[in-house]
Image (tube, grey):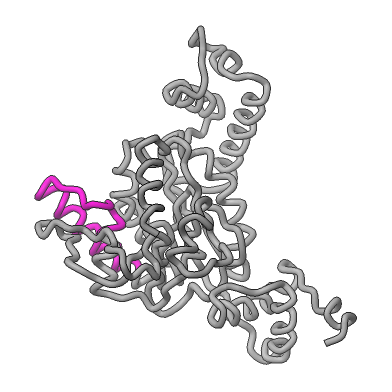
Amino acid sequence: MNKKNKKELQFNLESDAQLTRLAANFFQSKTAGEYSANDVAVVKEFFYHTLQSKPLKKYKVALCFICINPPYWEYIAKTIEGAKKFFLPEHQVDYFIWSDIPSNPEVIKQKIAEDLLKRGEAKASVIGSDLVSILLDDNKKKEFDSLVEGLAKVRKEINIFETEATQWPMPTLFRYHLFLQQEEKLQEYDYIFYCDIDMIFANYVGDEILSEGLTAALHPMYALRHNFIAPFEPNPQSAAYVPFYNTYYAGGFQGGKSADFIKAMKEMRKTIDLDFEKNNYIARWNDESHWNKYLKDNPPLVVLSPAYIYPDSLINEYYIKIWGRNYSPKLITLTKRFTVNKEGALAIQEQLKTL
């Protein structure tokens, strides 16, 4: 192909997204997401005539998030922005967000300020009506104002199901309980997906995630690592108990065909309640343990690579060594600064020594 033709085939996601969608799906299935813009352009030309006679179906998709407690609020604006750009752009995607973000911007300011004080990220000699201006220097004040503005915009533009604040791990453990509160609405959609709020959509997520069943993503810490025992629930008394299995999935991105995912959510709600209410027990990795138990008995039709739960650090030092390769990230999971501690860092250093 000459340079002139290459230039003519450069694509624009917004102007011919259907062609991009087909081409991206092709490469996702053949190369696990490794492809360039020019690769897509070449395949788009091949698919062009097919689309003339058989347009692709447009689905209704519900994308669910949980954003509870101020430390997580800072992620929501960028996550939604990335989803609007990269997540199934040729489909009708509606956002379902369960959150305790206040509707009043002044209350948002106060809650964030109180959280910064609590975490020791700001200081104040006086706590009162001038708390915000007292707390922050000029640079931090700009970040603070930008955060408040972004949250107010999200509250204005996207329907939020108001949820009471609860301490971790309750928001994630009882995620399916929250989602099923809107079961009637969710049933109207062809597909339902859930994504952690502290993840960034970094590249096109297309029809490769769609099937007639469930979709699950390999956990990046255990994918392709055959000499490492994944952290399945070890307690035989737990409803999430898995004695051994060779595939461990991440809880941060999941979903599938609506009927199948609603069925899965109902079963996991039941097993979570069985552990929590009857046995006063929480599984080793909360909802993720129950997700893995369900998938062991009901394998997903789509298994996504670590590109969809791609870590934001230690790629060369750790992950490439256990994967045996790298991936082109689709969804990046962010390290939460409020969860990083000395003990965790030391544990990672010890694991690195074993590679």
Camera-nearest residue between 342 and 185: 342
Counting from the top left corner in percent of width and height, residue 20 is at 68, 75
Q: Indicate whether residue 29 is drawn in magenta.
A: no
Residue located 48% across and 33% down the image: 102
Residue located 60% across and 28% down the image: 144
Residue 275 falls left or right of residue 132? left
Counting from the top left corner in percent of width and height, residue 346 is at 37, 41
Camera-nearest residue between 350 and 3: 350
Residue 173 falls left or right of residue 16? left
Counting from the top left corner in percent of width and height, residue 234 is at 17, 58
Q: In which quarter of the image is residue 301?
A: bottom left
Residue 128 falls left or right of residue 8? left
Q: Quadrant of residue 201?
A: bottom right
**What main secondary structure does the magenta stretch of the protein show?**
helix
Pick out the residue farthest to the top. 126
Residue 301 falls left or right of residue 75? left
Camera-nearest residue between 136 and 355: 355
Residue located 60% across and 73% down the image: 34
Q: What stretch is highlighted in magenta?
A: 261-289
Q: Quadrant of the N terminus?
A: bottom right
Q: Indicate whether residue 271 is drawn in magenta.
A: yes
Residue 187 appears in the figure? no
Q: Is residue 177 above or below residue 126?
A: below
Residue 107 appears in the figure? yes
Q: Is residue 110 above or below residue 301?
A: above
Residue located 55% across and 48% down the image: 158
Pick out the residue farthest to the front. 353
Total numbered badges shown on the rendered structure: 0
